[in-house]
Amino acid sequence: MDWPEGKDFTVSPEEEVTSAEECNKWPENEKQYALFTDGSCHTVGKHQRWKAAVWSPTQRVTEATEQQGESSQFAKVKAIQLALDVAE
């Protein structure tokens, strides 16, 4: 990726959203962009199983997928991919 040099991608405390309830306080034109994602992995015996999910409180959309054989980092990236699919 071609990231701009010196660009700060951190979120200020004022912009950080910690729950879906906070999303309800946003102006209507900003709520449409709210997507919450999560991904995780656990080991059962010798097998890793991951799950990724995305939720939109305004669009009332929930999507999830799960499979075997990947890490929690993979699951988190997969959740972002699901969010991009929902955003389309």
Image (cartoon, rainbow, N blue to C red):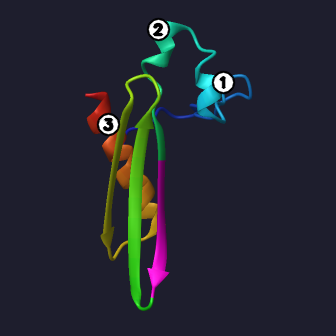
Amino acid type shown at disc 2: Asn
Q: Which type of secondary structure does the marked residue at label 3 adopt? A: helix
Of the numbered discs in the image, which one, if any, rests on residue 15? 1
Q: Residue at x 72, y 22 (%)?
A: 14
Tell me, yes or no, whether the highlighted magenta stretch contains residue 42.
Answer: yes
Q: Would you say 41 lies left or right of 85 here?
A: right
- The secondary element bearing badge 1 is classed as loop
Query: As rendered, which of 39 and 63 lies closer to the eye?
Result: 63
Q: Is residue 11 left or right of residue 51?
A: right
Using the image, determine if residue 70 lies above or below residue 10.
below
> Residue 78, percent across and down?
35, 53
Kindly identify which residue carries mark 2: 29
Q: Select label 2 or label 3 by which is in front.
A: 2
The tag earlier along the polypeptide, 2 or 1, is 1
Q: Residues within 10 Å of mark 2 (few under 14, many from 20)?
A: few
Residue occupying image coordinates x 63% and y 15%: 25
Q: Is residue 13 left or right of residue 39?
A: right
The reply to whether residue 8 is visible in this rendering is: no
**Which residue occupies the foreground of this view, 9 or 59?**
59
Residue bounds of the magenta highlight: 38-44
Q: Secondary structure under badge 2?
A: helix
The answer to the question of whether label 3 and label 1 lie on touching residues, with beta carbons closer than 8 A, is no
Is disc 3 surrounded by few (<14), some (14 to 19) or many (20+) residues within 10 Å? few
Q: Quadrant of the C terminus?
A: top left
- At label 3, which amino acid type do we have? Leu
Near mark 1 (Cα within 10 A), the count class, few <14, some 14-19 or many ≥20, is few
Q: Earlier in the sequence, mark 3 or mark 1?
A: 1
State whether residue 45 appears in this view.
yes
